[in-house]
Image (cartoon, rainbow, N blue to C red):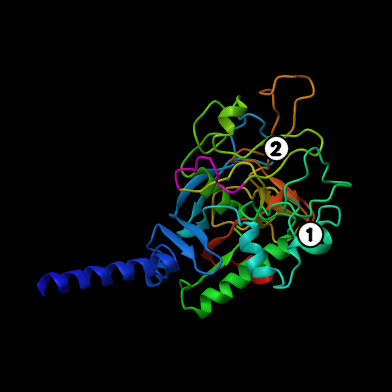
Amino acid sequence: MKAKATTIILLAMLLTHLASFAAGTGDAGDVKTLKPKDWTVPGVEMKMKLIPAGSFTMGSPTDEICRRGDEVPHEVKISKPLYMGAYEVTQRQFYKLMMPKDYNYKAWQYKRGPIADGAAYHFRPRPPGGRIMFHDSAVGGKLTLDKPMECVSWHRAREFCRKVTETERKAGRLPKGYIYRLPTEAEWEYACRAGTKGPYNVDGDYTKIAALKKFAWLSVCHGWGSDTGEVGKNRMPNAWGLYDMHGNVYEWCLDWYGQYAKGKATDPTGPAEGKEKAVRGGCFVLPRNPKSADLDKIVHPFLRSASRYRVPPDVGYYGIVGFRVVLAPVVATERQT
């Protein structure tokens, strides 16, 4: 009888553990106090990593490779911990939450285009030898739902975050004062660096494409032949467990793009107004140096940790721009925009 009772207890413990795992890594009560290192958002199944509070130098030194003038180094403090998506938001996650249930995926094709349909540009593999930008149909091709969502405007990405927030608030899983939203530029770069100070968030020979491809999804562009890759597949994460912070697709940030404010900053949110939103992390396209046939002679100014680019927030047809979600404190700009 004693052995039987022990078996029943162990079975109950196992079932409890499995139920917790199904709902997401970590306990919902603990997530409200930001304790677990890992958390999976139920429903959309977004894997999140805990990013500790801390300080870092945002921007880049004047001698960094491919450096641009909008990367002035300055000290930044991230005063509170936050969770960040381990991966860029996938098409699977986005469509489940944002697309109509009767959406005709089977009929989707490149030549009809994502602008009208709300789907990603890299939604199906192109036909062998096909040029997806013009006349070739991709009807019947395998869905690529684990690639990052792109062809999504800043407003649409923000709407996705709001829906996740509403669901988690109703479920009673939101930490007090926290919401799901796009990261600020400072949060993005802090999380990307994960304590590193060099051009990229892992060590390696940055002059070699093979070394970059260990942690960044890259594709040398031949005409329209480049493509996104499944999030995190066969690539190294940074020290905080984040994948694809370099390459694959640019990621929307909450901030308006502008020059950095002078001096030290705590939880900066960028300019109060602007015309373009900041995007970070570079994308899969590797522009070839026109003066060299050497594949390792690549000029890519936007792939580094400090690199900045900008896109108008209403643009929803770029197959190189996606987003990543954070569970982070509410900020003033999020209330106003």
The image quarter in which residue 12 lies? bottom left
| Local SS, label 1 | loop
Instruction: Tell me where residue 319 appears, x and y as whole percent.
Output: 75, 50
User: Which labelled disc corresponds to residue 237?
Assistant: none
Depth check: 162 or 80 in front? 162
* Residue extending furthest toward the left: 2
User: Which labelled disc corresponds to residue 69?
Assistant: 2
| Left or right of 35 in this view: 222 | right
The answer to whether residue 63 shows anywhere in this view is no
Crowding at dot 1, Cα within 10 Å, few <14 / some 14-19 / many 20+, comes out as: many
Q: Is residue 184 above or below residue 214?
A: below
Quadrant showing the C terminus: bottom right
Instruction: Tell me where residue 95 appears, x and y as whole percent.
Output: 67, 64
* Residue extending furthest toward the right: 135
Q: What whole-number distance in Å separates the C-alpha atoms at marks 2 and 1?
A: 42 Å
Q: What amino acid is labelled 1 in the image?
A: Trp
**Highlighted range, magenta:** 230-240
Depth check: 190 or 32 in front? 32
